[in-house]
Amino acid sequence: MTEQQALDLDAADPLPTRRAEFRVPPFSGPTGETAYLAGNSLGLQPKALRERIGAELDDWARLGVEGHTRARRPWLPYHEQLREPAAALVGARPAEVVVMNSLTVNLHLMMVSFYRPTPRRHAIVIEDSAFPSDSYAVRSQAAFHGYDPDEAVVRLAPEDVLPYLRASGDRVALVLLGTVNYLTGELLDMDAITAAGRAAGAIVGWDLAHAAGNVPLRLHETGADWAAWCSYKYLNAGPGSLAGAFVHERHLADRSLPKFAGWWSTDPRTRFEMAPTVTPVDTADSWQVSNPPILAMAPVLVSLEMFGQTGMEALRAKSIRLTGYLESQLDSVCAGRPARVITPRDPATRGAQLSVRVSGRDVGPVSERLREEFGVYTDTRRPDVIRLAPTPMYNTFHDCWRAATALATVLDGGAR
């Protein structure tokens, strides 16, 4: 397919791109912008963000401590503004969701409550290609409880999870999987795995780092016990931005659950009574520890507003169109070259990412040439995987055309 045909697809697409609302890194080529296909690592900056953060800085300068109650968006209840849009994004009820901390901190806070191992049932099931942070977190939790991580942590290929739960689920305390695998882009069957884990008597948690803002989610309906996600990838809230957590409503009023506590864990109606003990609330807010960082919450709120305006169903439909087009381009222009898509071919079993294995080449220099010479931003996982993520909020068919064409040229050793 030609460049003009890619441009024609952009012009005819039923969901116009919101690219003009983002700050796209510049490039010296004809377009003046990069083809930024690294949103699965760090999303682009919304242009609206600078004004939003500026407003909070102005309120701080103008009001000082009084900004907690008198800012344009009062800081004291600020996190409550994020509750409903975050819940809508992940398919939850508002009481089940809270925006707080970073992803791995939230994973640990959830495991404080939901990893309760016994000598008979203490295994933790994760993917064989789990993101390293998840692996480190579960191994440290197993060790903290006195178990050998090499024995307690069971690493399985996604296709082996259901058979293992049916055969050996009686020894599993926790199932913790990435909904979309960071390396391959594979989208796991949350419904089937959650049902199998719960039928086996295990707690089921999900890491949504590569799923939130990428694929439609139905956390409440699926019945997962808990989940956590970050907001700096597809949610475009900035490097290291605040994360989210979900706790199913069946657990919200369970006073027997152990959890760490802090000032924001208590009932806001009695918070300033300065009591020595927590007054529990029957919402996910109960898992909060510290008061919310307003300057870090503002980007998340901007992002959630944009997702609310566009809608995950429309974004998912465009994502399928973009990845399908990119896949066909890669198949065509990279034919006969040492590049193979390792992401599942069925659009229903993948997110907004195609991972390409480049045989016999260090992908670091390949990625560098794509960026420096062609203005194509990709993400790599050494030794041999390049990840291309056409993010439907701001990527285009033309971006995909540029990426596939440039990869073929680099693999041929051309255009220096």
Image (cartoon, rainbow, N blue to C red):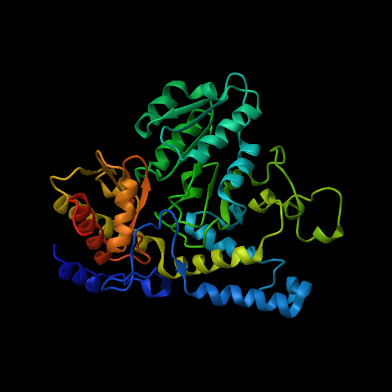
Quadrant position of the C terminus in the picture? bottom left
Q: Residue 18: x, y in percent?
A: 37, 72
Query: How many callouts does the rendering have?
Result: 0
Q: Determine whether 390 is above or below 126 in the image.
A: below
Q: Is residue 315 visible?
A: yes
Residue 56 in the figure: left or right of residue 236 = right
Q: Residue at x 44, y 32 (%)?
A: 196
Q: Residue 137: x, y in percent?
A: 57, 37
Q: Residue at x 67, y 60 (%)?
A: 292
Q: Determine whether 269 is above or below 63 in the image.
A: above
The quarter of the picture where residue 189 lies is: top left
- 3 or 99, which lies in front? 3
Q: Residue furthest bottom?
A: 62
Q: Determine whether 47 is above or below 399 in the image.
A: below
Q: Is residue 71 visible?
A: no
Q: Residue furthest front?
A: 416
Residue 412 in the figure: left or right of residue 162 = left
Q: Residue 89: x, y in percent?
A: 48, 59
Q: Determine whether 174 is above or below 179 in the image.
A: above
- 367 or 83, which lies in front? 367
